[in-house]
Image (cartoon, rainbow, N blue to C red):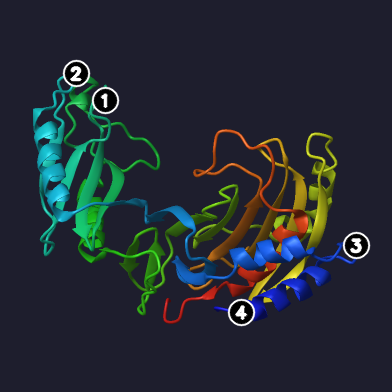
Amino acid sequence: MNLPRLALIALVIALTAACSKHAPPLTEQEKSTVSEITANLKPRCVGRYLVDVPDDALSRGDLTVQGVTFETKRMSVDEFVREMSAYEASLTAKKNMYGYQVLYDHGQVPNTPYGRYFVTLSDLDDTADLTRAIEAYKWDAGYEIKLRIEASDWVHSTYKLKVQNTPYAVPDIPINDVPEKTRLVLNFAASVRGRADDEIPGEPGVCFKDGFLPRKAAVGEEVSVLFALKDKTDVSFTLKTDTDLRELPKDTLLNRLPEIRSEIKDPNTNGHIIRSGAVDVSSIKAEELLLSGTTAARISGHNFTLQANTVTSGALTPYLVLNMDNGDFNSFTADSLKKASLTENEAIALWDIVSRTLRPRPNAF
């Protein structure tokens, strides 16, 4: 949803007035601030959802699918080729201080011109050779995409020879899952692709920071992306989805209100609840809580949250959380903050505009 500038200003005024019967109306300066922040909102894809944020917002995020982590880095294809050559050479030359093999397997990712994979000790200086790291690197669309998962191989370990010549029988730890996890990483590496921050895919799959993994909805997906305002970095939105996480009914946001009220009475928190309740956002049934209080930066600020699918998490209904912080640390802020960038009225107005743009991405599932 991209609202025209005048419509945004009208919505700010209407929603802010409805936030709390005790909240004063926006001042002219507050109206101007919110109008400036929301003048150019653009859809951003996170997981299988969309949310509109300022088009120049800074972003950072991560993805884990079936235990495989994904990281991205912008670089040219020439830089990628040089990096892979140097990395392979360093692994080949590396000597483990206890004499264990370091590099077990490496090669080209199938059907991927710019893709390499490596199977190594999980810790190159490990004191045993029981665990492995399986990594794949792919260059696509101006980005290096790194995939990584850890695995166990106690069958081919030389460490077990020093301990009664037999693998340990440890519950929940596989004796050798390197082959299946290598196949998993290679399959993901072949299909994952780079993605511009504002690109909205039209096929089923998972968006993450600078990347997209095409796949039908499935369990085992966890994604998070933080968007910080470029000129007010202590103001940020974080959208998270998780297909495997769910809460007990008693632990949902609104059911924990008595506990939350008790916690924010702490003099160190000095907080209060601005608003709470059930909301319907683009047919997403959610719960919302807006809090004011002392942040981790030890200044007065705000934390607003919207949660959905808290007790029904699954492939088609992932646990969904949208947070907004005002006056708090994140990866883009300075080491110290003196004052929150937004007033309470400005923070509420901004939240009421951005949070209501949350919706499933068409054909995402």
Under mark 1, the amino acid is Asp
- Residue 282 is labelled as 4
Label 3 or label 1, whichever lies nearer to me, is: 3
Which sits in the foreground, 194 or 345? 345
Residue underneath mark 3:
22
CB atoms of marks 2 and 1 within 8 Å: yes
Under mark 2, the amino acid is Tyr
- Give the mark, 2 or 4, whose residue is nearer the N terminus: 2
Residue underneath mark 2:
98
- Res. 305 image quadrant: bottom right
Query: Would residue 277 be seen by someone viewing this image from the given angle?
Result: yes
- Res. 90 image quadrant: top left
- Give the mark, 4 or 3, whose residue is nearer the N terminus: 3
In x, y percent, where is residue 211? 33, 62
> Does dot 1 land on a helix, a strand or a loop?
loop
Query: From the viewer's perspective, is residue 159 above or below residue 24?
Result: above
- 3D distance between C-alphas at marks 3 and 1: 60 Å
10 Å crowding of disc 2: few (<14), some (14-19), many (20+): few
Under mark 4, the amino acid is Ser
CB atoms of marks 2 and 4 within 8 Å: no
Instruction: Please tell me which residue is depicted at 42% across the width and 76% down the height of the picture.
Output: 364
Label 4 or label 3, whichever lies nearer to me, is: 3
Under mark 3, the amino acid is His
- Residue 126 is labelled as 1
Query: From the viewer's perspective, is residue 87 above or below residue 217?
Result: above
In x, y percent, where is residue 310? 63, 63
363 horizontally vs 162: left or right: right
- 3D distance between C-alphas at marks 4 and 3: 28 Å
- 3D distance between C-alphas at marks 2 and 3: 68 Å
- 3D distance between C-alphas at marks 2 and 4: 58 Å
Label 4 or label 1, whichever lies nearer to me, is: 4
- 3D distance between C-alphas at marks 4 and 1: 50 Å
